[in-house]
Amino acid sequence: MRLPAVKHLFKDGPSAVPGDWRGQLRNQIRSIDELLLFRPELVGHVAVDSARRWEADRASRSFRFATTRYYAGLIDAGNPECPILAQVLPQHVELHDLKSSDPDPLREEQHMPIPGLTHRYPDRVLWYLSHHCAVYCRFCLRKRKVSRADSAPRRDAREQALNYIASHTRIKEVILSGGDPLSLADEVLDELLTALRNIEHLISIRIHTRMPVTLPDRITPTLVDIFQKHYPITLVTHFNHAAEITEAAAGAVRRLRMAGVLVLNQSVLLRAINDTVCAQQELLSGLVRMGVKPYYLHRCDPVSGVSHFQTAIRAGAQILQALRGRNPGIALPRYVIDLPGGGGKVPIEVDYARGAVPEGGARFSNWAGEEFIVEDTD
């Protein structure tokens, strides 16, 4: 499969050259007007009605708008429903459910024994390391704090977090998250990973990042050397649509895999973006071709301002059921939902059981809808 290359992404000047990930972050597009200057052909896709444009600008003040020029370069100007644009463009509908929805439906803040460290499950913690991202996704679970300077983790909190993890021996896994933890400098990441590797009861270190999708140049030789030094590392990235799978993204994944990093993907089921069998099949097949294992498909969480992205709960299960027999098993993620009030994550499985049979055993249906009886043992 030939992957698309991306051209005409960078302004002239040393702060925006390919390979300079820090310069690319400094050179983010941070307003709708800047986006239209960079991609003037998108003017027809951005709300031109003055009232709606005013509301879209209001939405960007409620939750910042920012994208890399690389990711903005993926927008298909010929598609008014482009799945890239839909993920990043502030919309007036974001303001409609701000009062009725929940800024923290997973109750992450309630499960923080110390600032920035969520300890919901006995065996793992999630460490909020940065409030920065290369791209601010409009459906973000943590839009209550991501992009907000007042939510930036304090440096002295890192030592507190490390002490907490070291003193709680039931913790087996640490998830580095944010924002995007790969927005931190290489030296900081190396220091944190070194400290975590010195905690004997830890089994797994997992990094959640969208950088392979939104800023592939962040996956530098220096960074992958750090990951190789602290092997094994699991990196969970976040491709939502096949349009995000480019030569640059595939190159970033290749560099990670060459360093021994296990690369998984978690995506969010988003209305009118990837909520069809065709869209999911193309995405999941593309991930496996690239060497990425589909891990989770999330039902979009009911965060403030995202109701227009949400699908019916059953939609994800129905899509995955339709893909059984079409996609290899390795190309099928687990569909999950976060329970309200911080109840945790649970899988939503397609139920193939069709009840017991009088003569003993159980009745099942397969992916094609055919029914079978399986004998049971006493």
Image: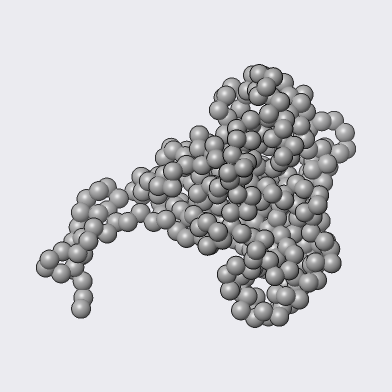
Is 240 displayed left or right of 316 in the figure? right
Where is residue 307 shown, x and y percent of the image?
55, 40
Model colouring: one colour
Image location of residue 162, percent across then percent down: 75, 72
Say whether residue 362 is visible. yes
Question: Could you tell me residue 330's position as x and y percent?
Answer: 45, 55
Q: In which quarter of the image is the C terminus?
A: bottom left
Residue at the far front in the pictured view: 99
Residue 334 in percent (x, y) is at 46, 56
Q: In this view, does 202 lie to the left or right of 345?
A: right
Is 320 rendered above or below residue 117?
above
From this viewpoint, which residue is outermost toward the left? 359
Residue reaching furthest right? Answer: 14
Where is 129 relative to 81, above or below?
Answer: below
Which residue does the image show at 50% across and 34% down from the upper left? 272
Tell me: residue 108, above or below residue 139.
below
**Residue depicted at x 59% and y 39%:** 97
Residue at x 22%, y 61% (from the top left corner) = 355
Image height check: is 224 above or below 83?
A: below
Which residue shows up at 67% across the image and 79% down it?
Answer: 168
| Residue 258 visible in the shown view | no
Near-viewer residue (129 or 99): 99
Is 68 or 273 nearer to us in this picture? 273
How many tags in the picture? 0
